[in-house]
């Protein structure tokens, strides 16, 4: 009999599989990025229906197969319901999840990326934080977690506040990452640098970003 594996993680994306199942990608603390199938999760009233929605965070119980995992059960601690019911907020979250999915690998230590996703979804849910700023911080910190973040660029003139913010993003702990705001002028500077870094270091087209651009 296969052993159950208990992992802490977040659903990055889900899609239909067969008539009633779901295929989910879960970013986990213990096993990196994993793909799992939830049998019957699309049936009305199935216990795995809510647990396989995007952004569901908690403990997942998995059976390991040859090519994928089977999701046996889940204990969800945060569904981020408010974000899921907010069209714009949901697309910000999906964009972040696409970036996490792009960077994460199976059997890698992805604790930092998982923590970044969790803190960033909380930040998106906070009315006091401008979402364009949350996006800039997430993009730069994701690059930093992947080990490529150069800090404030040395070859362009930036305000002292923008340069400080860029250095802070790179060095801050995840818990203190979303503890500042900036003026509109500084945000424009940060957006310009972040766009440049994303183009240089990610080299990928994200589908949710195209939709997000039409909303903001």
Image (cartoon, grey):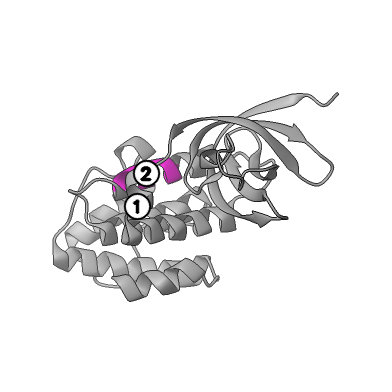
Q: Residue at x 38, y 54 (%)?
A: 138
- Residue at the far front: name it: 44
SS class, disc 1: loop
Q: Residues within 10 Å of mark 1 (few under 14, many from 20)?
A: few
Query: Is 121 a magenta residue?
Result: yes
According to the image, label 2 marks what residue? 81
Return the residue nearer the eye: 201 or 139: 139
Q: Position of residue 24 (x, y in %)?
A: 62, 48
SS class, disc 2: helix
Q: Position of residue 216 (x, y in %)?
A: 28, 70
Q: Is residue 105 left or right of residue 3?
A: left
According to the image, label 1 marks what residue? 85
Q: Residue at x 45, y 39 (%)?
A: 115
Q: Would you say residue 7 is visible in this rendering?
A: yes
- Dots 1, 2 in contact, CB < 8 A: yes
Image quadrant holding the N terminus, namely top right
Q: Residue at x 72, y 38 (%)?
A: 70
Q: Is residue 140 left or right of residue 192?
A: right
Q: Residue at x 66, y 37 (%)?
A: 31
Q: Label 1 vs label 2: CA separation?
A: 6 Å
Q: Is residue 62 left or right of residue 117?
A: right
Q: Tell me the tag on residue 93.
A: none
Q: Would you say residue 140 is visible in this rendering?
A: no
The image shows a total of numbered marks equal to 2
Query: Is 212 a magenta residue?
Result: no
Q: Is residue 199 left or right of residue 25?
A: left
The dominant secondary structure in magenta is: helix
Which quadrant would residue 43 be assigned to in this image?
top right
- Which residues lie in the magenta part? 116-123
């Amino acid at each position: 009999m296969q052993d159950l594996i208990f992992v802490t993680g977040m659903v990055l994306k889900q899609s239909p599989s067969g008539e009633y199942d779901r295929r989910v990608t879960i970013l986990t603390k213990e096993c990196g990025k994993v793909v799992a199938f939830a049998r019957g999760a699309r049936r009305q009233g199935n216990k795995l229906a809510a647990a396989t929605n995007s952004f569901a965070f908690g403990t997942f119980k998995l059976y390991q197969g040859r090519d994928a995992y089977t999701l046996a059960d889940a204990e969800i601690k945060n569904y981020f319901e408010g974000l899921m019911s907010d069209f714009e907020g949901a697309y910000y979250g999906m964009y972040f999840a696409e970036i996490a999915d792009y960077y994460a690998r199976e059997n890698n230590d992805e604790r930092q990326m998982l923590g970044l996703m969790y803190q960033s979804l909380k930040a998106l849910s906070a009315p006091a934080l401008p979402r364009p700023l949350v996006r800039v911080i997430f993009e730069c910190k994701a690059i930093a977690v992947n080990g490529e973040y150069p800090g404030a660029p040395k070859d362009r003139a930036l305000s002292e506040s923008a340069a400080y913010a860029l250095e802070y993003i790179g060095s801050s702990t995840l818990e203190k990452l979303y503890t500042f705001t900036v003026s509109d002028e500084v945000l424009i500077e940060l957006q310009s640098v972040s766009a440049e870094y994303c183009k240089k270091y990610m080299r990928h087209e994200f589908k949710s970003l195209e939709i997000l651009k039409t909303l903001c």
